[in-house]
Image: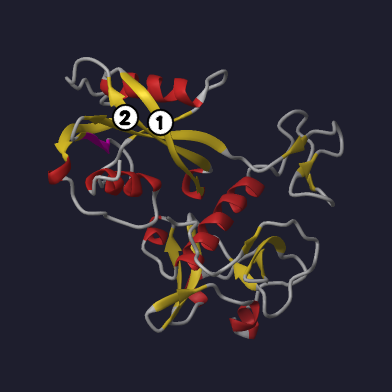
Amino acid sequence: MIQDIGKHSYDRSYSLAPAQERDFALCYRGGRVLLRKVGTEWALPRFCDFPETLRPDLTTARHFFALDGVGCYLCDPDPAEDALSEGWEYCSYQMLRSVRPMEVAFAAITGAQLDRWYKARVYCGRCGAKMRPSGIERAMNCPDCGLIEYPKISPAVIVAVTDGDKLLLTRYADRPYRGPALIAGFVEIGETLEDTVRREVLEEVGLHVKNIRYYKNQPWSFTDTMLVGFYCDLDGEAEIHLDRNELCEGVWMERSELPERENDVSLTSEMIEMFRIGEK
Protein backbone atom coordinates (compact mmCIF):
# COMPACT_ATOMS: atom_id res chain seq x y z
CA MET A 1 0.00 0.00 0.00
CA ILE A 2 1.07 3.60 -0.48
CA GLN A 3 2.45 3.88 3.08
CA ASP A 4 4.59 0.74 2.63
CA ILE A 5 7.91 2.39 1.77
CA GLY A 6 10.21 -0.53 2.58
CA LYS A 7 13.62 0.38 3.95
CA HIS A 8 12.85 4.10 3.79
CA SER A 9 11.87 6.00 6.95
CA TYR A 10 9.08 8.50 7.51
CA ASP A 11 9.50 10.71 10.60
CA ARG A 12 6.39 12.72 11.47
CA SER A 13 8.10 14.63 14.33
CA TYR A 14 7.26 18.33 14.43
CA SER A 15 10.24 20.65 13.96
CA LEU A 16 10.89 24.38 13.92
CA ALA A 17 14.26 23.91 12.19
CA PRO A 18 14.62 26.14 9.10
CA ALA A 19 14.93 24.57 5.66
CA GLN A 20 18.36 23.85 4.19
CA GLU A 21 19.47 23.68 0.54
CA ARG A 22 19.48 19.85 0.52
CA ASP A 23 16.00 19.52 2.02
CA PHE A 24 13.01 18.51 -0.09
CA ALA A 25 10.75 21.28 -1.39
CA LEU A 26 7.05 20.36 -1.51
CA CYS A 27 5.20 22.65 -3.94
CA TYR A 28 1.42 22.37 -4.45
CA ARG A 29 -0.65 24.16 -7.04
CA GLY A 30 -4.27 23.57 -8.06
CA GLY A 31 -4.54 20.02 -6.75
CA ARG A 32 -1.12 19.00 -8.09
CA VAL A 33 2.36 18.49 -6.66
CA LEU A 34 5.68 19.40 -8.26
CA LEU A 35 7.96 16.41 -8.99
CA ARG A 36 11.10 15.81 -11.05
CA LYS A 37 11.56 13.01 -13.56
CA VAL A 38 14.95 11.35 -13.09
CA GLY A 39 15.40 8.65 -15.72
CA THR A 40 12.32 6.44 -15.48
CA GLU A 41 11.50 7.36 -11.89
CA TRP A 42 10.09 10.36 -10.08
CA ALA A 43 11.85 12.30 -7.34
CA LEU A 44 11.00 15.01 -4.83
CA PRO A 45 12.85 18.22 -5.75
CA ARG A 46 15.39 19.63 -3.32
CA PHE A 47 15.75 23.36 -2.85
CA CYS A 48 19.18 23.23 -4.48
CA ASP A 49 17.71 21.58 -7.62
CA PHE A 50 15.84 24.74 -8.63
CA PRO A 51 17.41 27.37 -10.87
CA GLU A 52 18.39 30.37 -8.78
CA THR A 53 15.57 32.52 -10.18
CA LEU A 54 12.92 29.92 -9.23
CA ARG A 55 14.30 28.66 -5.91
CA PRO A 56 11.66 28.77 -3.15
CA ASP A 57 12.41 30.90 -0.12
CA LEU A 58 14.16 28.85 2.58
CA THR A 59 13.15 31.29 5.31
CA THR A 60 9.39 30.95 4.76
CA ALA A 61 9.26 27.19 4.07
CA ARG A 62 7.24 25.23 6.68
CA HIS A 63 8.51 21.89 7.99
CA PHE A 64 6.13 18.96 7.39
CA PHE A 65 8.06 15.75 8.14
CA ALA A 66 11.29 13.98 7.24
CA LEU A 67 11.99 11.26 4.68
CA ASP A 68 15.14 9.23 5.29
CA GLY A 69 16.34 11.96 7.64
CA VAL A 70 15.88 14.73 5.04
CA GLY A 71 13.39 17.47 5.90
CA CYS A 72 10.31 17.93 3.70
CA TYR A 73 9.13 21.55 3.63
CA LEU A 74 6.05 23.27 2.21
CA CYS A 75 6.98 26.09 -0.16
CA ASP A 76 4.83 29.18 -0.43
CA PRO A 77 4.74 30.74 -2.92
CA ASP A 78 5.49 27.91 -5.33
CA PRO A 79 7.16 28.20 -8.77
CA ALA A 80 4.89 29.04 -11.71
CA GLU A 81 4.27 26.12 -14.03
CA ASP A 82 5.20 27.96 -17.24
CA ALA A 83 8.63 28.81 -15.80
CA LEU A 84 9.69 25.18 -15.28
CA SER A 85 12.02 23.35 -17.64
CA GLU A 86 11.70 19.87 -19.07
CA GLY A 87 11.80 17.11 -16.45
CA TRP A 88 9.74 19.12 -13.94
CA GLU A 89 6.00 18.54 -13.74
CA TYR A 90 3.04 19.38 -11.53
CA CYS A 91 1.46 15.92 -11.16
CA SER A 92 -2.20 15.44 -10.26
CA TYR A 93 -3.00 13.64 -7.02
CA GLN A 94 -4.71 10.92 -9.05
CA MET A 95 -1.42 10.37 -10.88
CA LEU A 96 0.33 9.68 -7.57
CA ARG A 97 -1.33 6.25 -7.55
CA SER A 98 1.15 5.23 -10.24
CA VAL A 99 4.20 7.35 -9.27
CA ARG A 100 7.22 5.28 -8.28
CA PRO A 101 9.24 4.87 -6.13
CA MET A 102 6.54 4.53 -3.48
CA GLU A 103 8.26 6.75 -0.90
CA VAL A 104 7.97 9.67 -3.34
CA ALA A 105 4.25 9.09 -3.85
CA PHE A 106 3.67 8.69 -0.11
CA ALA A 107 5.55 11.85 0.82
CA ALA A 108 3.86 13.85 -1.95
CA ILE A 109 0.29 12.91 -1.00
CA THR A 110 0.91 13.14 2.76
CA GLY A 111 2.24 16.64 2.22
CA ALA A 112 -0.85 17.44 0.17
CA GLN A 113 -3.06 16.57 3.13
CA LEU A 114 -1.13 18.95 5.38
CA ASP A 115 -1.10 21.64 2.69
CA ARG A 116 -4.91 21.51 2.42
CA TRP A 117 -5.27 21.63 6.18
CA TYR A 118 -3.02 24.66 6.66
CA LYS A 119 -4.77 26.56 3.85
CA ALA A 120 -8.16 25.83 5.46
CA ARG A 121 -7.03 27.05 8.89
CA VAL A 122 -5.91 30.59 8.11
CA TYR A 123 -8.74 32.01 10.25
CA CYS A 124 -10.31 30.78 13.46
CA GLY A 125 -13.59 28.95 12.92
CA ARG A 126 -14.90 30.15 16.27
CA CYS A 127 -14.08 33.87 16.41
CA GLY A 128 -12.64 34.71 12.98
CA ALA A 129 -9.22 35.90 14.15
CA LYS A 130 -6.14 35.00 12.13
CA MET A 131 -4.58 31.74 13.31
CA ARG A 132 -0.90 31.24 14.16
CA PRO A 133 1.24 28.11 13.89
CA SER A 134 1.98 26.51 17.25
CA GLY A 135 5.55 26.76 18.46
CA ILE A 136 5.48 23.36 20.20
CA GLU A 137 3.34 20.99 18.09
CA ARG A 138 1.71 20.53 14.69
CA ALA A 139 -1.31 22.72 15.34
CA MET A 140 -2.81 26.13 14.63
CA ASN A 141 -3.63 28.41 17.56
CA CYS A 142 -6.05 31.31 17.79
CA PRO A 143 -4.42 34.20 19.68
CA ASP A 144 -7.81 35.73 20.54
CA CYS A 145 -10.05 32.92 21.81
CA GLY A 146 -7.45 30.19 22.40
CA LEU A 147 -8.87 27.61 19.99
CA ILE A 148 -6.35 24.91 18.99
CA GLU A 149 -6.82 23.10 15.67
CA TYR A 150 -5.02 19.86 14.78
CA PRO A 151 -4.66 18.26 11.32
CA LYS A 152 -7.88 16.83 9.96
CA ILE A 153 -8.08 13.02 9.97
CA SER A 154 -11.48 11.45 9.26
CA PRO A 155 -12.09 7.78 10.14
CA ALA A 156 -13.78 5.69 7.46
CA VAL A 157 -14.43 2.01 6.74
CA ILE A 158 -13.70 -0.18 3.73
CA VAL A 159 -16.01 -3.21 3.69
CA ALA A 160 -15.59 -6.47 1.78
CA VAL A 161 -18.98 -8.20 1.84
CA THR A 162 -18.77 -11.93 1.07
CA ASP A 163 -21.30 -14.65 0.37
CA GLY A 164 -19.45 -17.95 0.30
CA ASP A 165 -17.10 -17.72 -2.70
CA LYS A 166 -18.65 -14.48 -3.92
CA LEU A 167 -17.46 -10.92 -3.23
CA LEU A 168 -19.52 -7.77 -3.66
CA LEU A 169 -17.80 -5.30 -6.01
CA THR A 170 -19.02 -1.76 -6.69
CA ARG A 171 -18.14 1.27 -8.81
CA TYR A 172 -18.45 4.86 -7.66
CA ALA A 173 -20.97 7.07 -9.39
CA ASP A 174 -19.15 10.42 -9.40
CA ARG A 175 -15.45 10.04 -8.56
CA PRO A 176 -12.35 10.20 -10.75
CA TYR A 177 -11.44 6.62 -9.79
CA ARG A 178 -13.44 4.28 -12.06
CA GLY A 179 -11.98 0.91 -11.06
CA PRO A 180 -13.59 -1.81 -8.92
CA ALA A 181 -14.32 -0.77 -5.35
CA LEU A 182 -15.74 -2.06 -2.08
CA ILE A 183 -18.36 -0.48 0.15
CA ALA A 184 -16.87 2.56 1.90
CA GLY A 185 -18.03 5.40 4.09
CA PHE A 186 -17.14 7.83 6.87
CA VAL A 187 -17.83 7.18 10.53
CA GLU A 188 -20.58 9.37 11.94
CA ILE A 189 -20.79 10.89 15.42
CA GLY A 190 -21.69 8.33 18.06
CA GLU A 191 -20.98 5.29 15.87
CA THR A 192 -18.63 2.40 16.45
CA LEU A 193 -16.68 1.17 13.42
CA GLU A 194 -18.88 -1.93 13.31
CA ASP A 195 -22.01 0.24 13.33
CA THR A 196 -20.59 2.15 10.37
CA VAL A 197 -20.01 -1.11 8.48
CA ARG A 198 -23.63 -2.18 8.97
CA ARG A 199 -25.06 1.23 8.10
CA GLU A 200 -22.95 1.84 4.99
CA VAL A 201 -23.70 -1.61 3.52
CA LEU A 202 -27.41 -1.17 4.16
CA GLU A 203 -27.48 2.39 2.75
CA GLU A 204 -25.41 1.72 -0.37
CA VAL A 205 -26.59 -1.75 -1.46
CA GLY A 206 -29.56 -2.59 0.77
CA LEU A 207 -27.95 -5.66 2.37
CA HIS A 208 -27.58 -6.90 5.93
CA VAL A 209 -24.27 -8.32 7.17
CA LYS A 210 -22.91 -10.38 10.06
CA ASN A 211 -19.58 -11.76 11.38
CA ILE A 212 -17.75 -8.44 10.95
CA ARG A 213 -13.98 -8.99 11.10
CA TYR A 214 -11.21 -6.35 11.27
CA TYR A 215 -8.49 -6.74 8.62
CA LYS A 216 -6.09 -3.77 8.43
CA ASN A 217 -5.95 0.04 8.37
CA GLN A 218 -4.36 2.60 6.08
CA PRO A 219 -3.69 6.37 6.16
CA TRP A 220 -5.31 7.69 2.96
CA SER A 221 -4.23 11.29 2.47
CA PHE A 222 -6.12 11.62 -0.83
CA THR A 223 -9.25 12.25 1.28
CA ASP A 224 -7.75 13.16 4.71
CA THR A 225 -8.87 9.74 5.91
CA MET A 226 -7.82 6.87 8.14
CA LEU A 227 -9.28 3.83 6.38
CA VAL A 228 -10.19 0.78 8.45
CA GLY A 229 -10.81 -2.43 6.52
CA PHE A 230 -13.33 -5.11 7.46
CA TYR A 231 -14.56 -8.38 5.97
CA CYS A 232 -18.10 -9.49 6.73
CA ASP A 233 -20.65 -12.10 5.61
CA LEU A 234 -24.00 -11.56 3.96
CA ASP A 235 -26.90 -12.00 6.37
CA GLY A 236 -30.10 -12.80 4.48
CA GLU A 237 -31.17 -11.96 0.94
CA ALA A 238 -28.46 -11.24 -1.68
CA GLU A 239 -30.49 -8.95 -3.96
CA ILE A 240 -28.68 -5.63 -4.39
CA HIS A 241 -30.52 -2.29 -4.16
CA LEU A 242 -28.08 0.44 -5.21
CA ASP A 243 -27.92 3.94 -3.84
CA ARG A 244 -27.50 5.63 -7.23
CA ASN A 245 -26.21 8.81 -5.64
CA GLU A 246 -23.14 6.90 -4.42
CA LEU A 247 -22.71 3.96 -6.79
CA CYS A 248 -23.26 3.23 -10.46
CA GLU A 249 -22.75 -0.52 -10.16
CA GLY A 250 -22.88 -3.34 -7.62
CA VAL A 251 -22.35 -6.99 -8.54
CA TRP A 252 -21.56 -10.31 -6.89
CA MET A 253 -18.47 -11.91 -8.42
CA GLU A 254 -17.15 -15.43 -7.98
CA ARG A 255 -13.68 -15.70 -6.50
CA SER A 256 -12.43 -17.24 -9.76
CA GLU A 257 -13.83 -14.32 -11.81
CA LEU A 258 -12.21 -11.51 -9.85
CA PRO A 259 -9.66 -9.40 -11.74
CA GLU A 260 -6.04 -9.57 -10.64
CA ARG A 261 -4.82 -6.83 -8.35
CA GLU A 262 -5.15 -3.46 -10.09
CA ASN A 263 -2.69 -1.45 -7.98
CA ASP A 264 -0.43 -1.78 -4.97
CA VAL A 265 -1.35 1.49 -3.25
CA SER A 266 -4.83 1.02 -1.79
CA LEU A 267 -6.37 -1.02 1.01
CA THR A 268 -9.34 -1.75 -1.27
CA SER A 269 -7.15 -3.35 -3.90
CA GLU A 270 -5.33 -5.47 -1.32
CA MET A 271 -8.58 -6.68 0.25
CA ILE A 272 -9.98 -7.72 -3.13
CA GLU A 273 -6.74 -9.55 -3.93
CA MET A 274 -6.69 -11.36 -0.58
CA PHE A 275 -10.16 -12.73 -1.27
CA ARG A 276 -9.29 -13.61 -4.89
CA ILE A 277 -6.32 -15.76 -3.89
CA GLY A 278 -8.27 -17.48 -1.13
CA GLU A 279 -6.56 -15.95 1.90
CA LYS A 280 -9.82 -14.36 3.11
Viewer-nearest residue: 266 or 75: 266
Are the residues at dot 2 and dot 1 in contact (C-beta closer than 8 Å)? Answer: no
Crowding at dot 1, Cα within 10 Å, few <14 / some 14-19 / many 20+, comes out as some
Identity of the residue drawn at 81% across and 48% down: 134
Q: Nearer the viewer, mark 2 or mark 1?
A: 1
- Dividing the picture into quarters, in which one does residue 205 lie? top left
Estimate the spatial distance between the alpha carbons at disc 2 and disc 1, rounded to whole Å: 24 Å
The magenta stretch spans residue 46: no
Q: Is residue 11 left or right of residue 192?
A: right
**Which residue is rendered at x = 45% and y = 57% of the image?**
2
Which contiguous range is marked in magenta?
Answer: 167-172
Residue at figure coordinates x 53%, y 20% from the top left: 191
In the image, residue 168 lies in the stretch drawn in magenta: yes
Q: Horizontal and vertical percent for residue 73?
A: 67, 65
> Which quarter of the figure has residue 185?
top left
Q: Amino acid at mark 1?
A: Arg
Q: Which mark is residue 213?
A: 1
- Residue 126 picture location, percent across and down: 74, 28
- Can you say which quadrant of the picture contains the C terminus? top left
Q: In the rendered view, does 246 fall on the left or right side of 259?
A: right
Residue shown at the point (32%, 57%) measured from the top left: 263
Work out whether 182 lies above or below 200: below
Which residue bears the numbered disc 2? 246
Q: Is residue 184 left or right of residue 186?
A: left
Q: Quadrant of the N terminus?
A: bottom left
With respect to residue 274, does 39 lie above or below?
below
Determine the secondary structure under disc 2: loop
- Which residue lies most toward the top here? 236
Examine the rendering and report whether any part of residue 94 can be seen. yes
User: Disc 1 on helix, strand or loop?
Assistant: strand
